[in-house]
Image: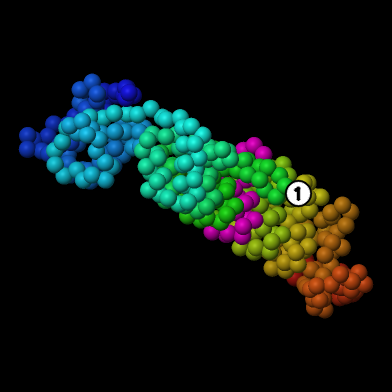
Amino acid sequence: MGVQIEQKPAFVEIMKRKFAPSAQLIRVRQLSGEELAAIPVEELTDVESLKQHLQQTFGLPPRFRQKLLHDGVALEDGMVLDSPKDVTLVVLPVLRPTAEEADELVEAVRLGEEVGVEEILNRAQDPDAAGTQDKTPLFEAAKLGHADIAELLLEAGADKDKPSVELHRFSRRTVTPLGVACQNGHEEIVRLMLEFSASVQQEGDGVPPLTWASAKGKPEIVRLLLDARADAGKTSAGSMPPVHVAAGLGDVETTRLLLESRADAEERNESRRGLTPLDLAAWANCKDVMRLLLERRADAEKRCRGFPVIDLAPWAWCMLSPAGPPPRKTSNCNALQRCKEMLLESMDYAQRLQQSYHI
């Protein structure tokens, strides 16, 4: 049984324009027989474009829930509209699928079967129904990078921000489709999700998309999220701020983008023993990131649990000394102590850094 359309008189009058008798029109009627719209043929291409026109003009459901009948026969979306027609519109209710039907859609998404996905959606099946593994179809499409399928699901009205539970290492986190696209480095999916106004701020116990993108080492995705007003300082319980992640990975470009978006170069991450971005860059022996942070006035004398950065990673600090760097791979405590002594002998390290970076 079709869904009754609540008419909006102003829109109906606009659509029922007076054309010359010779004009070729596609006339759309409801099941009651009342005319809903009269559209010139030249403004349409096919049945799909007509459905999209009706959705945009009258606020109807997506095309997957619209059936257009001509002489009692349902018209396929790809049918070309090049001549006048009278069609009857039937709006279908959302089909709540069984577990097997939900799994069928999720499996078609995983396999990248775009035609199969569209066929299932044309049943008016709920695009948000999760399979037996509690993953929504859109989540799976975003995770696997199936952009065309993700666009179909979004067009069908899938909830762009609905999270799924994902096992990450030894913990379970809620992740949105945008978050999992960032986590897997799928730039095209990220662009698509942002075009559909997906939230760039993860709620609940999940990790913000910006943190996932920073961890993946994808400056292009980080830039997209920042342009969409993602908060460079936002984090969640048990996860590091994006700038800490980027600094610890030695990702200069991502660190620069985050700092330009007002990420705090001196913020302590309490979930990781109070480490600052500079601490993490030093631990990872990332000289270029350390320079960048110092240029942004990161405090070289910040202490982590009573130890200054120089004590945390003397071999990294020594790379800034005229004495030169020590061997990169060494676990000898005496060698590390000698690195520290070399740096301290050349000059008081804080004073030298201030002179080198004019801070």
Q: Counting other residues with Cα less than 10 Å from the Cα at mark 1, is it few (<14), some (14-19), or many (20 or more)?
A: some
Q: Is residue 95 left or right of residue 309?
A: left
Image quadrant occupied by the C terminus? bottom right
Q: Is residue 329 above or below residue 225?
A: below
Residue at the far bottom in the pictured view: 323
Asked whether residue 57 is in view, the answer is no
Q: Is residue 333 left or right of residue 256?
A: right
Return the residue at label 1: 269
Closest to the observer, 7 or 324: 7
Residue at the far right in the pictured view: 334
Asked whether residue 41 is in view, the answer is yes
Closest to the observer, 107 or 68: 107
Residue in the picture at 29% in, 23% down: 7
Residue in the picture at 74% in, 53% down: 266
Residue 96: within the magenta?
A: no
Q: Is residue 357 left or right of residue 200?
A: right
What amino acid does circle 1 point to?
Answer: Asn
Q: Is residue 254 above or below residue 132?
A: below
Closest to the observer, 22 or 308: 22
Q: Is residue 116 left or right of residue 216?
A: left
Q: Which residues are magenta?
A: 199-220
Image quadrant occupied by the N terminus? top left
Closest to the observer, 75 or 240: 75
Residue 332 screen position, x and y as percent:
89, 71
Residue 119 screen position, x and y as percent:
37, 42
To which quarter of the image does residue 42 belong?
A: top left
Residue at the far front in the pictured view: 100
Residue 311 screen position, x and y as percent:
87, 63
